[in-house]
Amino acid sequence: MSQHHNSTRADRIAKKKLKDECKAADLPCWLSGCTIDYDTAWNDLDNPRRFQRDHFFRTSTHLDLYNDPSNWRPSFADCNDARGNSTAVGGLGIPSRQWRPSE
Ligand SMILES: [Zn+2]
């Protein structure tokens, strides 16, 4: 699912900047509206609410937008994983709650 993710130094810095900005603004997960645990490391796999950078337009279909900050959204890992490789369709509206993982 994440085989296309590069990890250049610039990208890591950009990701950290996004996380810091989202944390400062206390932004919720854009998929579910739930609170993100910004203080958890990205690689703390035991915490499903760790911050992950999501892409509004999936990288699989819009690789050109991978590094475009306007395409970035804050999410937490469980929601991002649940969304998988689905493509956001229908313009730029607020996504419905259909992405919420079943519990
Ligand atoms: Zn969420």
Image (spheres, helix red, strand yellow):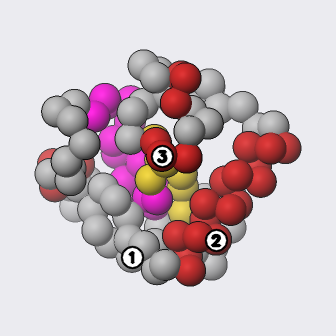
Task: Answer whether residue 76 is magenta in the image.
Answer: yes
Left/right placement of residue 61 relative to residue 89 reads: right
Please rate how many residues cluster around mark 2, counting C-alpha atoms within 10 Å: few if below 14, some from 14 to 19, many from 20. Answer: few
- The one of 65 and 34 positioned closer to us in this rendering: 65
Mark 2 vs ligand 1: CB below 8 Å: no
Location of residue 23 with respect to 2 vertically, above or below: below
Estimate the x, y position of residue 57 in percent, counting from the top left: 39, 33
Residue at horizontal 38 percent and vertical 64 percent from the top? 29
Label 3 secondary element: helix
Q: Amino acid at mark 3?
A: Ser
In this rendering, position of residue 90 left or right of residue 31: left
**Residue that badge 3 annotates:** 70
Which amino acid, by three-letter code, is at mark 2?
Asp
Question: Residue 2 is drawn in which quadrant?
Answer: top right
The residue at 38%/41% (across/down) is 56
Indicate the amino acid at tag 1. Answer: Thr
Residue count near mark 3 (Cα–Cα under 10 Å), binned few <14, some 14–19, many ≥20? few
User: Crowding at label 1, few (<14), some or many (≥20) Cα neighbours within 10 Å?
Assistant: some
Q: Is residue 89 above or below residue 42?
A: above
- Please name the residue that numbered disc 1 is placed on: 35
Disc 3 vs disc 1: Cβ atoms closer than 8 Å? no
Q: Nearer the viewer, mark 1 or mark 2?
A: 2
**Is 44 rendered above or below residue 34?**
above
The alpha-carbon separation of the residues under discs 3 and 1 comes to 21 Å
Residue 76 percent across, percent down from the top left: 46, 60
Position in image of residue 64 (x %, y %): 55, 23
Instruction: Determine which of the numbered discs, if any, sits on residue 20 in the image.
Output: 2
Q: State the residue at coordinates (25%, 53%).
A: 101
Q: Which residues are magenta?
A: 74-88
